[in-house]
């Protein structure tokens, strides 16, 4: 289905990095202090790569442009390619701006057998976008992902730090309606929350919901 939102990028989607940039810095003083505190808990700077990327994702507005990867590389004294390699391994790091609600639809084996592609096609119809695209109003980004490790509740959709199970083509419209009514839970909020959980050592506050 043709989307009316931003066109699918020709050189990668939200999960593919862009060309290497010039050096620069956008970390605030607080972010630098935060990173230094995290680094102090590890025997070497490179071990703080994942939290450093979360901080960068927050400081750069919810995604990791090339400048953000370069800044992490500089601050951890690691090669750019190493930082890019780590960031591109994990789907929670975004390489393009994305919507307020990031719908990550599992289309792995169990979910696919139960009807994940029916759910995906219904979402494409409701939102008028394809996987990898964001709606014109910037509210939803749609992504196809591998197993979310809750196969017993197939089909599963992850939205930020929440899992929704037993999603079907018939009930996914209700999920969209519910999300539209919720306060914005932006990529910046999420990156900030996860960084703070790591700093405080508290358990991750992931919640699971049934549609
Ligand atoms: S196959 Fe979808 S959660 Fe495992």
Image (spheres, rainbow, N blue to C red):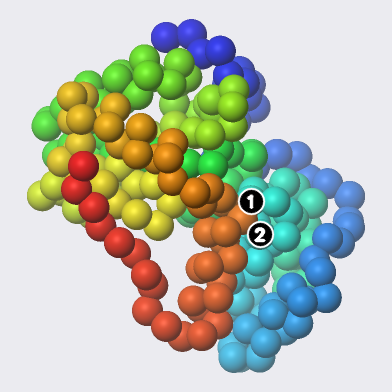
State the quadrant of the N terminus: top left
Residue at mark 2: 58
Task: Tell me: 23 left or right of 46.
Answer: right
- The picture places residue 187, in percent across and down from the top left corner, at 57, 51
User: Height in image: 66 above or below 143?
Assistant: below
The C terminus is located in which quarter? top left
Q: Secondary structure at mark 1?
A: loop
Q: Residue furthest top?
A: 2
Residue drawn at (48%, 8%) of the image: 2
Marks 2 and 1 sit apart, C-alpha to C-alpha, by 5 Å
Q: Where 52 sits versus 7, above or below?
A: below
Q: Is residue 13 visible?
A: no
Q: Which residue, as the protein is rendered here, is positioned at the far front?
A: 181
State yes or no: discs 2 and 1 in contact (Cβ < 8 Å): yes
In this rendered view, identify the residue nearer to me: 85 or 49: 49
- For numbered disc 2, what is the local secondary structure? helix
Q: Is residue 84 left or right of residue 4?
A: right
Instruction: Give coordinates of residue 33: x percent, y percent.
Output: 75, 82
| Residue at (36% x, 15% y) in the render | 125
The image quarter containing residue 96 is top right
Label 1 packing within 10 angstroms: few (<14), some (14-19), many (20+): many
Query: Is residue 63 at all visible to an observer of this figure?
Result: yes
Which residue matches tag 1?
A: 62
Residue toward you, 46 or 2:
2
Question: Would you say the beta carbon of the disc 1 residue lies within 8 angstroms of ligand 1?
Answer: no
Residue at 36% across, 33% down? 176
Residue 36 point in image, percent of width and height:
72, 84
């Amino acid at each position: 289905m043709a989307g009316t939102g931003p066109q699918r990028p020709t050189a990668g989607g939200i999960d593919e990095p862009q060309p290497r940039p010039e050096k620069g810095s956008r970390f605030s003083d607080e972010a630098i202090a935060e990173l230094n505190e995290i680094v102090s808990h590890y025997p070497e700077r490179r071990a703080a790569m994942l939290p450093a990327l979360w901080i960068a994702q927050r400081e750069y507005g919810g995604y990791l442009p090339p400048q953000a990867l370069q800044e992490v590389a500089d601050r951890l004294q690691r090669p750019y390619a190493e930082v890019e390699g780590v960031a591109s391994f994990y789907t929670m790091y975004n390489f393009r701006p994305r919507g307020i609600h990031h719908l990550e639809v599992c289309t792995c084996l169990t979910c696919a057998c139960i009807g994940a592609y029916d759910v995906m096609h219904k979402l494409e119809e409701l939102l008028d976008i394809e996987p990898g695209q964001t709606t014109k109003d910037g509210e939803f980004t749609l992504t196809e992902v591998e197993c979310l490790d809750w196969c017993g509740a197939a089909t599963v959709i992850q939205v930020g730090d929440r899992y929704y199970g037993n999603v079907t083509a018939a009930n996914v419209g209700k999920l969209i309606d519910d999300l539209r009514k919720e306060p914005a839970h932006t990529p910046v909020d999420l990156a900030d929350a996860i960084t703070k959980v790591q700093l405080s050592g508290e358990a991750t506050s992931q919640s699971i919901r049934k549609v």
